[in-house]
């Protein structure tokens, strides 16, 4: 198993075992047994909180400790572009498109001057 | 309000093939579908910048169909996390799909195995569009319409992943970096936009704050702890507030 995980097959095994199955288990469970669950029950609220915190966490990790090509962008630019995206989102009366475009513009312009090309 | 006879469809649309095609057409003209397409272009770009293989990136979209799960998977892989830890993180984050599927089931009345297949495609975009489009349809058309919608969304997502990945390799480096950051940036704003209750806002803030703490602590499967502690604390405070208000 360990050897398999370090071979070229690792991403594919991971997709099936750590991506597809743990995701679809919930979809199937919903069909088989989920009829009684209420959306605002304590358990569902807890699940929402955990899922939210993990997605927020994964984004923070990408900003602070990225890997691959994203490492080439300096930290202040990675963090700054997300902060700009947020600021514009709120200033534009909550337009997600405006926020994302502004954040991307800052990031790309900044990367143009800092990333070697 | 009294029903106007004008509102009824001109011809009965009970032919499953027709309903399937109408679902596919609805997917192609949906704004939600456009957002989905753009998100997966960003995901393809992210995979490219993280060094995740192209075929794997495409397969992950074809098979998983849930961007948060995929995001956890590829970032975990890039960070060299243990497979079990990634699986647990994905498992916890995907729990939110359960209520989505449950709320769609009343519109997908059919045999069990077809329902299981239908549930496989449920994610945020398909849920939003199905909730809007399925109820007005005649019950017999809903299932084929849903599969037309779902398969078209899925095919488009797979194409977008591939396009984003290939695009990333052909763009100037600064643009490739921008593409790689599209998904995290739109996700974090989407979290704020979709937040309804105190628990949503608190878990977002706690998740952002706790992520560096657990990375610095060098905790194995750090995101799992971020989720459990951050989400747990948010839930607890939300619950106390609600109890006091009641």
Image (cartoon, rainbow, N blue to C red):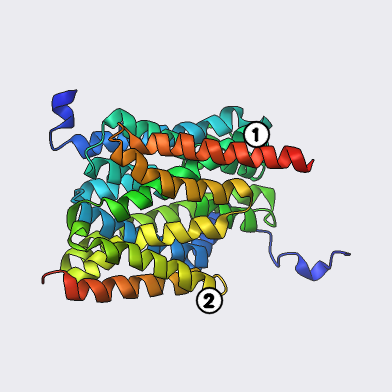
Residue B246 lies in what quarter of the image?
top right
Q: Do badges 2 and 1 share one subunit?
A: yes
Specify few, some or many for label 1: CA neighbours under 10 Å numbering under 14, 14-19, or 20 or more. Answer: few
In this view, the residue in front, A39 or B34, is A39
Tell me residue B244's x, y (percent). 75, 40
**Where does the image place residue B110, in percent across and percent down from the top left?**
61, 37
Residue sitting at x 57%, y 36%: A46
Instruction: Give me the C-alpha separation between circle 2 and circle 1.
Output: 34 Å
> In this image, A7 relative to B60: left or right?
left
Horizontal and vertical percent position of residue B88: 38, 31
Question: Of helix, strand and loop, which one carries label 1?
Answer: helix
Evaluate whether residue A81 shows in this view: yes
- Residue sitting nearer the eye, A100 or B210: B210
Location of residue B48 by image quarter:
bottom left
Which residue is pictured at 42% across the width and 39% down the height? B226
Q: Which residue does the numbered mark 2 point to in the structure image?
A: A92
Q: Chain of mark 2?
A: A
Disc 1: host chain: A
Q: Nearer the viewer, residue B116 or B52?
A: B52
- The residue tagged 1 is A42
Q: Nearer the viewer, residue A56 or A80?
A: A80
Left or right, residue A31 beside residue B93 = right
For mark 2, give the secondary structure: loop
Q: Which quarter of the figure is the N terminus of chain B placed in?
A: bottom right
Q: Residue furthest top?
A: A1
| Lower position in the chain sequence, tag 2 or tag 1 | 1
Q: Position of residue B42 (x, y in %)?
A: 33, 61
Report the label total.
2
Badge number at residue A80: none
Above or below B59: residue A91: below
Q: Residue at x 57, y 33 (%)?
A: A31
């Amino acid at each position: 198993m360990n050897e398999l995980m370090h071979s070229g097959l690792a991403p594919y095994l991971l997709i099936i075992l750590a991506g597809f199955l743990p995701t679809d288990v919930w979809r199937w469970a919903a069909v088989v047994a989920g009829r009684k669950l209420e959306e605002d029950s304590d358990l569902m609220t807890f699940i929402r909180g955990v899922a939210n915190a993990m997605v927020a966490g994964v984004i923070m990790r990408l900003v602070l400790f990225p890997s691959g090509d994203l490492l080439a962008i300096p930290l202040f630019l990675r963090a700054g572009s997300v902060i700009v995206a947020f600021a514009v989102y709120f200033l534009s009366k909550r337009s997600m498109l405006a926020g994302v475009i502004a954040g991307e513009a800052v990031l790309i312009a900044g990367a143009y001057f800092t990333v070697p090309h | 309000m009294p029903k106007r006879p004008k509102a009824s469809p001109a011809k009965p649309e009970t032919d499953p093939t027709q309903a399937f095609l109408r679902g596919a057409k609805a997917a192609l003209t949906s704004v939600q579908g456009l957002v989905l397409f753009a998100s997966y272009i960003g995901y393809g770009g992210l995979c490219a910048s993280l060094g995740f293989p192209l075929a794997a990136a495409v397969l992950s979209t074809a098979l998983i169909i849930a961007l948060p799960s995929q995001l956890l998977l590829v970032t975990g892989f890039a960070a060299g996390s243990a497979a079990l830890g990634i699986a647990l993180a994905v498992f916890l984050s995907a729990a939110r799909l359960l209520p989505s599927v449950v709320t769609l089931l009343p519109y997908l009345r059919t045999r069990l195995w077809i329902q299981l297949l239908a549930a496989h495609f449920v994610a945020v975009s398909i849920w939003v569009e199905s909730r809007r489009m399925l109820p007005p349809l005649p019950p017999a058309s809903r299932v084929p319409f849903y599969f037309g919608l779902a398969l078209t969304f899925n095919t488009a997502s797979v194409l977008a992943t591939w396009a984003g990945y290939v695009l990333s390799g052909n763009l100037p480096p600064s643009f490739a970096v921008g593409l790689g950051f599209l998904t995290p940036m739109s996700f974090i704003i989407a979290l704020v936009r979709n937040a309804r209750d105190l628990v949503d806002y608190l878990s977002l803030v706690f998740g952002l704050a706790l992520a560096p703490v657990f990375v610095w602590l060098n905790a194995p499967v750090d995101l799992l702890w971020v989720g459990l502690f951050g989400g747990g604390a948010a839930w607890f405070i939300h619950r106390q507030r609600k109890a006091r208000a009641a």
